[in-house]
Image: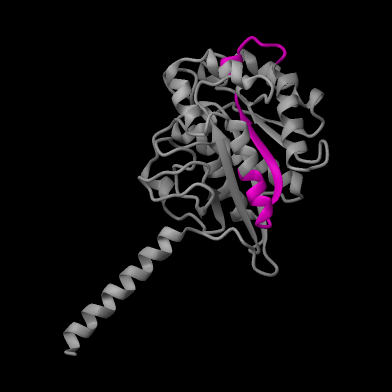
Amino acid sequence: MRRSNLLQVLAMFLMGYAMAGCAAGNSGKQEPGEELQVYLCFGQSNMEGNAKIEAQDSVGIDKRFMVLQAVDCPQSGRIRGEWYTAVPPLVRCYTGLFPADYFGRTLVANLPAHIKVGVVNVSIGGCSIELFRKDHYQEYVETSPDWLKNMVHEYDGDPYKRLIEMGRLAQKEGGIIKGILLHQVETNSGDKQWPEKVKEVYDSILSDLSLEPDSVPLLAGELVNEDQNGACAWMNEIIQTLPEVIPNAYVIPSAGCEGVEDRLHFSAAGYRELGKRYAQQMLSILGYEI
């Protein structure tokens, strides 16, 4: 075989090998001495990802920060139930930047090198907390508008069940559920029973994942703050009562996190800052300070 032909064949082989490696995604299985910390995320649009992903958000991502894909995304080649380096979007195919993008980056930058961080996110823009209540979600979905039903359909009609399915898969592969991240209450604005409903969902998650009651910290973010003219900023007072209902709950402040014109969502800069605050709280819980 001529040298030029040999080099061409070799180049094609290497290209095919590289593409196969990309398609396979990251492995969630742990090597000896490694640890995979898993964080479950749920909520509505601010946790789903509402800000446009900017160039800086897709570069320099440590391979120790991973996402367990909760839905198939043919556009990006991601397959449900597979691990990938956490290049956004991390939720559904067309979602944007959200707090866990910079939560995970901040964690891996401050945790020992043998620790990997994996996020699982099942969130639905515009949904009520009722969507995650096992005994109430069906009635809620049936009375919801078609746009919400279409998003729920991507999770086979039961987002909560998908969250548990992915959590169990992560556990099976050696992951340790270290925390739960929540950002949801805009749709429940004015509902003084919201903290008790969140506790019901929290208790269900721990029970369904065979975890001890109150053993996993719940980190709940505030809504767009009054300093950003947030439309539902007054609901932050209700969010702040969560630790009275869930002993292992922590409220992540939103003051100073940039909002956008609709007064309900954060800008990309706002999500970056809010995500770092989630991480700072989690690092403190784990015994690290930054």
Residue 167 falls within the magenta-colored stretch: yes
Q: Nearer the viewer, residue 142 or 86?
A: 142
265 vs 212, left or right, is left
41 vs 177, left or right, is left
Residue at image point 27% right, 76% down: 11
Place of residue 180 in the rendered image (x, y in percent of width and height, measured from the top left): 68, 38
* Residue 245 visible in the snapshot: yes
Q: Quadrant of the N terminus?
A: bottom left
Q: Quadrant of residue 239?
A: top right
Place of residue 38 in the rendered image (x, y in percent of width and height, measured from the top left): 65, 48
Residue at image point 49% right, 41% down: 71
Place of residue 85 in the rendered image (x, y in percent of width and height, measured from the top left): 49, 54
Give the colour scheme of this rendering. one colour
Query: Is 256 rendered above or below residue 216?
Result: above
* Residue 175 visible in the snapshot: no
Residue at image point 59% right, 46% down: 119
233 vs 94, left or right, is right
Residues drawn in magenta: 166-193
Q: Quadrant of residue 40?
A: top right
Residue at image point 48% right, 18% down: 263
Query: Is 197 rendered above or below residue 268?
Result: above
Q: Nearer the viewer, residue 220 or 7?
A: 7
Residue 132 falls within the magenta-colored stretch: no
Place of residue 235 in the rendered image (x, y in percent of width and height, measured from the top left): 64, 15
